[in-house]
Image (cartoon, grey):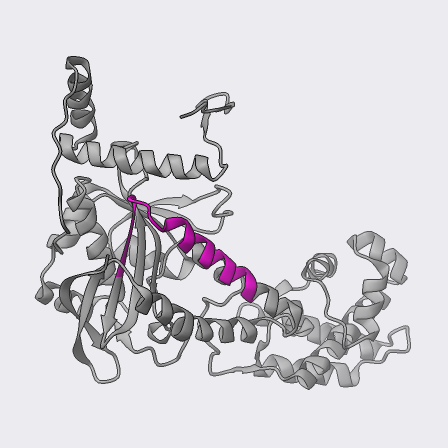
Protein backbone atom coordinates (compact mmCIF):
# COMPACT_ATOMS: atom_id res chain seq x y z
CA UNK A 1 0.00 0.00 0.00
CA UNK A 2 1.24 3.45 -0.87
CA UNK A 3 0.50 6.56 1.20
CA UNK A 4 -1.21 8.86 -1.25
CA UNK A 5 -0.03 12.11 0.31
CA UNK A 6 3.46 13.56 0.50
CA UNK A 7 5.46 14.30 3.61
CA UNK A 8 5.40 17.99 2.72
CA UNK A 9 1.65 18.02 2.26
CA UNK A 10 1.24 16.49 5.70
CA UNK A 11 3.53 19.06 7.30
CA UNK A 12 1.68 21.97 5.72
CA UNK A 13 -1.70 20.59 6.72
CA UNK A 14 -0.68 19.74 10.27
CA UNK A 15 0.55 23.29 10.78
CA UNK A 16 -2.76 24.80 9.74
CA UNK A 17 -5.17 22.13 11.05
CA UNK A 18 -7.28 23.22 14.00
CA UNK A 19 -6.02 21.81 17.27
CA UNK A 20 -8.95 19.58 18.13
CA UNK A 21 -9.58 16.04 19.28
CA UNK A 22 -9.48 13.42 16.53
CA UNK A 23 -10.29 10.15 18.25
CA UNK A 24 -13.04 7.92 16.87
CA UNK A 25 -14.57 4.50 17.43
CA UNK A 26 -17.09 2.76 19.62
CA UNK A 27 -14.31 1.35 21.82
CA UNK A 28 -14.09 4.87 23.16
CA UNK A 29 -17.73 4.96 24.12
CA UNK A 30 -17.14 3.54 27.57
CA UNK A 31 -14.66 6.34 28.20
CA UNK A 32 -17.05 8.87 26.73
CA UNK A 33 -19.83 7.77 29.07
CA UNK A 34 -17.52 8.25 32.04
CA UNK A 35 -16.68 11.75 30.99
CA UNK A 36 -13.05 10.76 30.64
CA UNK A 37 -12.76 12.29 27.20
CA UNK A 38 -13.76 15.74 28.36
CA UNK A 39 -10.97 18.23 28.91
CA UNK A 40 -8.86 17.98 32.02
CA UNK A 41 -9.54 20.11 35.06
CA UNK A 42 -10.05 23.69 34.11
CA UNK A 43 -8.21 26.39 36.01
CA UNK A 44 -11.21 26.85 38.34
CA UNK A 45 -11.64 23.16 39.12
CA UNK A 46 -10.25 21.02 41.91
CA UNK A 47 -10.28 17.29 42.48
CA UNK A 48 -12.09 16.52 45.71
CA UNK A 49 -10.31 14.62 48.43
CA UNK A 50 -12.42 12.20 50.46
CA UNK A 51 -13.04 14.62 53.34
CA UNK A 52 -14.25 17.25 50.91
CA UNK A 53 -16.60 14.77 49.29
CA UNK A 54 -18.11 14.36 52.75
CA UNK A 55 -18.55 18.13 53.04
CA UNK A 56 -20.34 18.26 49.71
CA UNK A 57 -22.62 15.40 50.69
CA UNK A 58 -23.51 17.20 53.90
CA UNK A 59 -24.52 20.14 51.73
CA UNK A 60 -26.50 17.83 49.42
CA UNK A 61 -28.29 16.29 52.39
CA UNK A 62 -29.18 19.70 53.78
CA UNK A 63 -30.42 20.83 50.38
CA UNK A 64 -32.73 17.86 49.83
CA UNK A 65 -33.98 17.97 53.39
CA UNK A 66 -34.78 21.68 53.28
CA UNK A 67 -36.45 21.48 49.88
CA UNK A 68 -38.57 18.62 51.20
CA UNK A 69 -39.54 20.70 54.26
CA UNK A 70 -40.34 23.61 51.98
CA UNK A 71 -42.80 21.41 50.10
CA UNK A 72 -44.13 20.03 53.40
CA UNK A 73 -43.43 16.48 52.31
CA UNK A 74 -42.65 13.51 54.50
CA UNK A 75 -39.85 11.22 53.36
CA UNK A 76 -42.48 8.70 52.26
CA UNK A 77 -44.35 11.31 50.22
CA UNK A 78 -41.19 12.54 48.51
CA UNK A 79 -40.21 8.95 47.75
CA UNK A 80 -43.61 8.40 46.15
CA UNK A 81 -43.58 11.61 44.14
CA UNK A 82 -40.00 11.31 42.92
CA UNK A 83 -40.26 7.54 42.51
CA UNK A 84 -37.20 6.75 44.58
CA UNK A 85 -36.57 4.56 47.62
CA UNK A 86 -37.40 6.02 51.02
CA UNK A 87 -34.31 4.68 52.70
CA UNK A 88 -32.19 6.26 50.02
CA UNK A 89 -33.68 9.66 50.75
CA UNK A 90 -32.92 9.17 54.42
CA UNK A 91 -29.33 8.15 53.62
CA UNK A 92 -28.83 11.18 51.37
CA UNK A 93 -30.25 13.52 54.02
CA UNK A 94 -28.30 12.13 56.98
CA UNK A 95 -25.35 9.98 55.92
CA UNK A 96 -22.49 11.87 54.25
CA UNK A 97 -20.66 8.59 53.66
CA UNK A 98 -23.48 7.31 51.50
CA UNK A 99 -22.93 7.50 47.71
CA UNK A 100 -26.30 8.27 46.08
CA UNK A 101 -27.28 6.39 42.96
CA UNK A 102 -27.20 8.49 39.77
CA UNK A 103 -30.81 7.58 38.98
CA UNK A 104 -31.96 8.85 42.36
CA UNK A 105 -30.19 12.14 41.78
CA UNK A 106 -31.84 12.45 38.38
CA UNK A 107 -35.26 11.81 39.90
CA UNK A 108 -34.74 14.29 42.73
CA UNK A 109 -33.36 16.87 40.31
CA UNK A 110 -36.49 16.46 38.22
CA UNK A 111 -38.80 16.72 41.21
CA UNK A 112 -37.14 19.80 42.70
CA UNK A 113 -36.20 21.40 39.37
CA UNK A 114 -32.49 21.38 40.11
CA UNK A 115 -29.62 20.98 37.63
CA UNK A 116 -28.56 17.33 37.60
CA UNK A 117 -24.92 18.09 36.99
CA UNK A 118 -24.66 20.12 40.17
CA UNK A 119 -26.33 17.40 42.20
CA UNK A 120 -23.93 14.85 40.76
CA UNK A 121 -21.03 17.08 41.74
CA UNK A 122 -22.43 17.41 45.27
CA UNK A 123 -22.85 13.67 45.61
CA UNK A 124 -19.19 13.02 44.89
CA UNK A 125 -20.02 11.06 41.72
CA UNK A 126 -17.61 13.27 39.85
CA UNK A 127 -14.55 14.41 41.64
CA UNK A 128 -13.60 17.35 39.50
CA UNK A 129 -15.52 20.29 40.87
CA UNK A 130 -15.68 24.00 40.40
CA UNK A 131 -13.85 25.59 43.33
CA UNK A 132 -16.37 28.41 43.68
CA UNK A 133 -19.28 25.99 43.69
CA UNK A 134 -17.61 23.90 46.39
CA UNK A 135 -17.19 26.97 48.62
CA UNK A 136 -20.76 28.07 48.05
CA UNK A 137 -22.14 24.64 48.85
CA UNK A 138 -20.15 24.34 52.05
CA UNK A 139 -21.30 27.83 53.08
CA UNK A 140 -24.91 26.84 52.44
CA UNK A 141 -24.52 23.68 54.55
CA UNK A 142 -23.06 25.66 57.45
CA UNK A 143 -26.11 27.94 57.54
CA UNK A 144 -28.71 25.24 56.93
CA UNK A 145 -30.87 24.45 59.90
CA UNK A 146 -31.74 20.80 60.15
CA UNK A 147 -34.39 21.09 62.78
CA UNK A 148 -37.46 21.16 60.63
CA UNK A 149 -39.70 23.95 59.42
CA UNK A 150 -37.84 26.79 57.75
CA UNK A 151 -38.16 30.35 58.87
CA UNK A 152 -37.98 33.13 56.33
CA UNK A 153 -34.23 33.57 56.70
CA UNK A 154 -33.66 29.85 56.12
CA UNK A 155 -35.90 30.06 53.10
CA UNK A 156 -33.87 32.95 51.68
CA UNK A 157 -30.63 31.05 52.18
CA UNK A 158 -32.13 28.00 50.51
CA UNK A 159 -33.51 29.89 47.54
CA UNK A 160 -30.27 31.81 47.10
CA UNK A 161 -28.34 28.55 46.88
CA UNK A 162 -30.83 27.00 44.46
CA UNK A 163 -30.63 30.10 42.28
CA UNK A 164 -26.84 29.92 42.42
CA UNK A 165 -26.97 26.30 41.27
CA UNK A 166 -29.27 27.11 38.38
CA UNK A 167 -27.17 30.08 37.28
CA UNK A 168 -24.00 28.02 37.64
CA UNK A 169 -25.08 25.24 35.30
CA UNK A 170 -24.62 27.55 32.34
CA UNK A 171 -21.06 28.38 33.34
CA UNK A 172 -18.53 26.14 31.57
CA UNK B 1 4.05 -8.36 1.12
CA UNK B 2 4.79 -11.64 -0.74
CA UNK B 3 2.23 -12.50 -3.36
CA UNK B 4 1.28 -15.82 -4.88
CA UNK B 5 -0.56 -16.55 -8.04
CA UNK B 6 -3.44 -18.81 -8.92
CA UNK B 7 -5.39 -19.41 -12.10
CA UNK B 8 -9.13 -19.41 -11.67
CA UNK B 9 -11.47 -21.24 -14.08
CA UNK B 10 -14.99 -19.85 -14.06
CA UNK B 11 -18.09 -20.92 -15.92
CA UNK B 12 -19.63 -18.57 -18.44
CA UNK B 13 -22.33 -17.68 -15.98
CA UNK B 14 -19.90 -17.10 -13.10
CA UNK B 15 -17.78 -14.85 -15.31
CA UNK B 16 -20.84 -12.85 -16.37
CA UNK B 17 -21.87 -12.34 -12.76
CA UNK B 18 -18.34 -11.40 -11.82
CA UNK B 19 -18.30 -8.78 -14.58
CA UNK B 20 -21.70 -7.44 -13.57
CA UNK B 21 -20.90 -7.25 -9.87
CA UNK B 22 -17.58 -5.59 -10.52
CA UNK B 23 -19.20 -2.96 -12.72
CA UNK B 24 -22.02 -2.41 -10.23
CA UNK B 25 -19.67 -2.03 -7.30
CA UNK B 26 -17.00 -0.02 -9.07
CA UNK B 27 -14.32 -2.64 -8.42
CA UNK B 28 -11.89 -4.44 -10.67
CA UNK B 29 -12.57 -8.17 -10.87
CA UNK B 30 -9.50 -8.86 -8.80
CA UNK B 31 -10.47 -6.33 -6.14
CA UNK B 32 -13.94 -7.83 -6.00
CA UNK B 33 -12.71 -11.38 -5.55
CA UNK B 34 -10.34 -10.29 -2.80
CA UNK B 35 -13.15 -8.46 -1.04
CA UNK B 36 -15.38 -11.49 -1.44
CA UNK B 37 -12.72 -13.56 0.30
CA UNK B 38 -12.48 -11.07 3.17
CA UNK B 39 -16.22 -10.97 3.63
CA UNK B 40 -16.53 -14.74 3.44
CA UNK B 41 -13.90 -15.20 6.11
CA UNK B 42 -15.56 -12.52 8.24
CA UNK B 43 -18.90 -14.32 8.07
CA UNK B 44 -17.39 -17.76 8.66
CA UNK B 45 -15.49 -16.65 11.74
CA UNK B 46 -18.64 -15.24 13.30
CA UNK B 47 -20.73 -18.28 12.60
CA UNK B 48 -18.01 -20.57 13.92
CA UNK B 49 -18.08 -18.51 17.08
CA UNK B 50 -21.77 -19.22 17.45
CA UNK B 51 -23.04 -15.88 16.19
CA UNK B 52 -26.01 -15.73 13.84
CA UNK B 53 -26.58 -13.73 10.68
CA UNK B 54 -29.91 -12.15 10.03
CA UNK B 55 -31.46 -10.28 7.17
CA UNK B 56 -34.07 -7.63 7.82
CA UNK B 57 -36.96 -6.79 5.54
CA UNK B 58 -36.70 -3.09 4.70
CA UNK B 59 -40.38 -2.31 5.32
CA UNK B 60 -41.73 -4.81 7.82
CA UNK B 61 -38.41 -4.92 9.73
CA UNK B 62 -39.00 -8.63 10.06
CA UNK B 63 -35.81 -10.56 10.64
CA UNK B 64 -34.99 -13.91 9.16
CA UNK B 65 -31.96 -15.91 10.05
CA UNK B 66 -29.60 -16.53 7.19
CA UNK B 67 -29.49 -20.31 7.04
CA UNK B 68 -25.93 -20.90 6.31
CA UNK B 69 -22.78 -22.36 5.15
CA UNK C 1 2.96 -8.49 9.62
CA UNK C 2 4.23 -5.02 10.40
CA UNK C 3 5.50 -3.00 7.47
CA UNK C 4 6.91 0.53 7.42
CA UNK C 5 4.90 2.50 4.89
CA UNK C 6 6.33 5.97 5.04
CA UNK C 7 8.22 8.48 7.11
CA UNK C 8 5.95 11.31 8.18
CA UNK C 9 6.26 14.21 10.61
CA UNK C 10 4.37 15.17 13.74
CA UNK C 11 4.50 18.64 15.20
CA UNK C 12 5.89 18.92 18.72
CA UNK C 13 3.66 21.60 20.23
CA UNK C 14 6.21 22.54 22.87
CA UNK C 15 9.13 23.14 20.55
CA UNK C 16 7.01 23.97 17.49
CA UNK C 17 9.35 21.73 15.51
CA UNK C 18 8.43 18.76 13.37
CA UNK C 19 9.82 15.41 14.43
CA UNK C 20 10.07 12.42 12.09
CA UNK C 21 7.69 9.55 12.71
CA UNK C 22 7.08 6.26 10.97
CA UNK C 23 3.71 5.13 9.71
CA UNK C 24 3.40 1.36 9.90
CA UNK C 25 0.79 -0.92 8.40
CA UNK C 26 0.23 -3.75 10.84
CA UNK C 27 1.01 -3.62 14.55
CA UNK C 28 3.14 -5.84 16.76
CA UNK C 29 3.91 -6.51 20.37
CA UNK C 30 5.62 -3.11 20.76
CA UNK C 31 2.40 -1.33 19.96
CA UNK C 32 0.26 -3.56 22.17
CA UNK C 33 2.77 -3.17 24.99
CA UNK C 34 2.77 0.59 24.50
CA UNK C 35 -0.98 0.55 24.75
CA UNK C 36 -0.92 -1.57 27.91
CA UNK C 37 2.02 0.08 29.65
CA UNK C 38 2.02 3.66 28.43
CA UNK C 39 -1.48 4.59 27.27
CA UNK C 40 -3.76 2.59 29.54
CA UNK C 41 -2.32 3.65 32.91
CA UNK C 42 -2.90 7.30 32.00
CA UNK C 43 -6.45 6.56 30.90
CA UNK C 44 -7.12 4.61 34.10
CA UNK C 45 -5.92 7.53 36.20
CA UNK C 46 -8.41 9.77 34.40
CA UNK C 47 -11.21 7.31 35.00
CA UNK C 48 -10.40 7.22 38.71
CA UNK C 49 -10.25 11.01 38.76
CA UNK C 50 -13.56 11.47 37.05
CA UNK C 51 -15.58 8.95 39.05
CA UNK C 52 -15.81 8.30 42.77
CA UNK C 53 -13.30 5.80 44.12
CA UNK C 54 -14.08 2.24 45.19
CA UNK C 55 -15.87 -0.37 43.22
CA UNK C 56 -17.44 2.13 40.81
CA UNK C 57 -14.14 3.30 39.38
CA UNK C 58 -12.78 -0.24 39.39
CA UNK C 59 -15.83 -1.53 37.53
CA UNK C 60 -15.56 1.27 34.97
CA UNK C 61 -11.90 0.54 34.43
CA UNK C 62 -12.66 -3.13 34.04
CA UNK C 63 -15.43 -2.35 31.52
CA UNK C 64 -13.20 -0.28 29.35
CA UNK C 65 -10.31 -2.77 29.47
CA UNK C 66 -12.62 -5.61 28.56
CA UNK C 67 -14.21 -3.60 25.78
CA UNK C 68 -10.87 -2.75 24.19
CA UNK C 69 -9.41 -6.24 24.60
CA UNK C 70 -12.54 -7.85 23.24
CA UNK C 71 -12.51 -5.67 20.13
CA UNK C 72 -8.77 -6.21 19.60
CA UNK C 73 -9.11 -9.98 20.01
CA UNK C 74 -11.91 -10.32 17.44
CA UNK C 75 -9.64 -8.84 14.78
CA UNK C 76 -6.77 -11.33 14.88
CA UNK C 77 -6.29 -13.35 11.73
CA UNK C 78 -9.04 -11.54 9.83
CA UNK C 79 -8.21 -10.54 6.28
CA UNK C 80 -10.74 -7.75 6.50
CA UNK C 81 -8.94 -6.22 9.48
CA UNK C 82 -6.08 -3.80 9.08
CA UNK C 83 -4.14 -1.78 11.58
CA UNK C 84 -1.78 1.16 11.47
CA UNK C 85 0.58 2.70 13.98
CA UNK C 86 2.47 5.98 14.08
CA UNK C 87 5.67 5.82 16.10
CA UNK C 88 8.31 8.33 17.12
CA UNK C 89 11.52 6.76 18.36
CA UNK C 90 9.75 3.45 18.71
CA UNK C 91 6.95 4.84 20.90
CA UNK C 92 3.37 4.53 19.69
CA UNK C 93 1.83 7.95 19.14
CA UNK C 94 -1.28 6.86 17.29
CA UNK C 95 -3.25 3.73 16.43
CA UNK C 96 -5.82 2.94 13.76
CA UNK C 97 -7.87 -0.22 13.36
CA UNK C 98 -9.95 -0.66 10.20
CA UNK C 99 -12.19 -3.22 8.60
CA UNK C 100 -13.07 -3.61 4.95
CA UNK C 101 -16.14 -5.69 5.76
CA UNK C 102 -18.30 -2.60 5.75
CA UNK C 103 -20.75 -0.91 3.45
CA UNK C 104 -21.57 2.69 2.67
CA UNK C 105 -24.74 4.36 3.93
CA UNK C 106 -24.83 7.64 2.04
CA UNK C 107 -27.40 7.39 -0.77
CA UNK C 108 -24.99 8.15 -3.58
CA UNK C 109 -22.79 5.21 -2.61
CA UNK C 110 -25.21 3.06 -0.69
CA UNK C 111 -24.06 -0.52 -0.25
CA UNK C 112 -20.64 -0.01 -1.81
CA UNK C 113 -17.55 -1.25 -0.01
CA UNK C 114 -15.83 1.13 2.37
CA UNK C 115 -12.98 1.06 4.84
CA UNK C 116 -14.56 1.51 8.25
CA UNK C 117 -12.37 3.02 10.97
CA UNK C 118 -13.12 0.96 14.06
CA UNK C 119 -10.70 2.77 16.30
CA UNK C 120 -8.55 5.82 15.76
CA UNK C 121 -6.72 7.30 18.69
CA UNK C 122 -3.76 9.42 19.56
CA UNK C 123 -1.74 8.67 22.69
CA UNK C 124 -3.12 10.23 25.89
CA UNK C 125 -0.14 12.55 26.21
CA UNK C 126 -1.05 14.04 22.83
CA UNK C 127 -4.62 14.81 23.81
CA UNK C 128 -6.00 18.05 25.17
CA UNK C 129 -8.50 15.88 26.99
CA UNK C 130 -5.79 14.27 29.09
CA UNK C 131 -3.21 16.91 29.67
CA UNK C 132 -3.04 20.69 29.62
CA UNK C 133 0.18 20.34 27.60
CA UNK C 134 -0.43 17.83 24.83
CA UNK C 135 2.71 16.98 22.91
CA UNK C 136 2.35 15.85 19.29
CA UNK C 137 -0.09 17.22 16.76
CA UNK C 138 -0.88 15.54 13.46
CA UNK C 139 -1.74 11.93 14.27
CA UNK C 140 -5.30 12.45 13.03
CA UNK C 141 -4.20 13.89 9.69
CA UNK C 142 -1.71 11.04 9.13
CA UNK C 143 -4.13 8.26 10.04
CA UNK C 144 -7.06 9.62 8.00
CA UNK C 145 -4.69 9.87 5.02
CA UNK C 146 -3.64 6.27 5.71
CA UNK C 147 -7.26 5.10 5.80
CA UNK C 148 -8.05 6.80 2.49
CA UNK C 149 -4.90 5.33 0.97
CA UNK C 150 -5.94 1.86 2.13
CA UNK C 151 -9.40 2.38 0.69
CA UNK C 152 -7.86 3.21 -2.71
CA UNK C 153 -5.51 0.25 -2.43
CA UNK C 154 -8.47 -2.09 -1.95
CA UNK C 155 -10.28 -0.59 -4.92
CA UNK C 156 -12.80 1.34 -2.82
CA UNK C 157 -11.75 4.70 -4.27
CA UNK C 158 -11.12 6.41 -0.97
CA UNK C 159 -14.48 5.70 0.66
CA UNK C 160 -14.23 5.57 4.45
CA UNK C 161 -16.64 5.66 7.40
CA UNK C 162 -16.38 6.05 11.17
CA UNK C 163 -18.20 6.89 14.38
CA UNK C 164 -16.87 10.01 16.02
CA UNK C 165 -16.78 10.86 19.69
CA UNK C 166 -18.41 14.24 20.38
CA UNK C 167 -15.13 16.11 20.86
CA UNK C 168 -13.90 15.04 17.42
CA UNK C 169 -16.99 15.82 15.38
CA UNK C 170 -15.81 19.18 14.08
CA UNK C 171 -12.55 17.60 12.94
CA UNK C 172 -14.33 15.00 10.82
CA UNK C 173 -17.14 17.24 9.60
CA UNK C 174 -15.40 20.53 8.98
CA UNK C 175 -11.72 19.76 8.54
CA UNK C 176 -11.91 16.36 6.84
CA UNK C 177 -15.09 17.29 4.96
CA UNK C 178 -16.92 14.09 5.79
CA UNK C 179 -20.69 13.76 5.53
CA UNK C 180 -22.42 13.77 8.90
CA UNK C 181 -25.14 11.14 8.90
CA UNK C 182 -26.23 11.98 12.43
CA UNK C 183 -26.45 10.09 15.67
CA UNK C 184 -26.41 6.35 15.21
CA UNK C 185 -29.17 4.73 17.24
CA UNK C 186 -27.82 1.25 16.57
CA UNK C 187 -27.28 -0.85 19.71
CA UNK C 188 -23.52 -0.69 19.47
CA UNK C 189 -23.43 3.06 19.55
CA UNK C 190 -26.33 3.66 21.90
CA UNK C 191 -27.36 6.99 20.50
CA UNK C 192 -24.14 8.68 21.50
CA UNK C 193 -21.84 8.59 18.51
CA UNK C 194 -22.44 10.29 15.18
CA UNK C 195 -21.66 8.41 11.99
CA UNK C 196 -19.49 10.09 9.35
CA UNK C 197 -18.77 8.92 5.86
CA UNK C 198 -16.49 10.14 3.11
CA UNK C 199 -17.38 9.76 -0.54
CA UNK C 200 -14.87 9.06 -3.23
CA UNK C 201 -15.03 12.72 -4.30
CA UNK C 202 -14.62 13.82 -0.71
CA UNK C 203 -11.56 11.62 -0.36
CA UNK C 204 -10.02 13.07 -3.49
CA UNK C 205 -10.72 16.56 -2.23
CA UNK C 206 -9.09 15.71 1.10
CA UNK C 207 -5.87 14.37 -0.34
CA UNK C 208 -5.52 17.01 -2.99
CA UNK C 209 -6.47 20.06 -0.96
Q: Is residue C55 left or right of residue C162?
A: right
Q: Would residue A2 be visible to someone looking at this image?
A: yes
Q: How many marks?
A: 0
Q: Would residue A172 be visible to someone looking at this image?
A: no
Q: Position of residue B39 (x, y in %)?
A: 31, 35
Q: Is residue B51 left or right of residue A163?
A: left
Q: What residue sits 63% from the left and 81% below the top?
A: A134
Q: What residue sits 37% from the left and 50% below the top?
A: C75
The majority secondary structure of the magenta stretch comes to helix
> What stretch of residues is rendered in magenta?
C61-84
Q: Position of residue C126 (x, y in %)?
A: 33, 74
Residue A76 highlighted magenta (yes or no): no
Q: What residue sits 22% from the left and 42% below the top?
A: C199
Q: Position of residue C176 (x, y in %)?
A: 24, 55
Q: Is residue A87 above or below residue C15?
A: above
Q: Position of residue B25 (x, y in %)?
A: 21, 29
Q: Nearer the viewer, residue C23 or A130?
A: C23
Residue C81 highlighted magenta (yes or no): yes
Amino acid sequence: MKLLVSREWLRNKILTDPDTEIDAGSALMVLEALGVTVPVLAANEVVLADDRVVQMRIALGALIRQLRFQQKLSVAALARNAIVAEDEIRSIEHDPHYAPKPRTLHQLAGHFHLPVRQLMAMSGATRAIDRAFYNEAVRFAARADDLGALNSEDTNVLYAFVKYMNDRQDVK
Amino acid sequence: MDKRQMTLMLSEREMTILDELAAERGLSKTALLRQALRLYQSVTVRISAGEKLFVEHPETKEKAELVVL
Amino acid sequence: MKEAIETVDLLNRETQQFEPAILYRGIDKTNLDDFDRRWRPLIDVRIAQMTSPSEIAAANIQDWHWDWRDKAKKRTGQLASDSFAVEIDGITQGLLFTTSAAFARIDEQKGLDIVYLEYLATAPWNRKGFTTRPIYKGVGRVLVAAAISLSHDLGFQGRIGLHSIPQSESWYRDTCGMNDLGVDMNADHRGVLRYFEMTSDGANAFISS
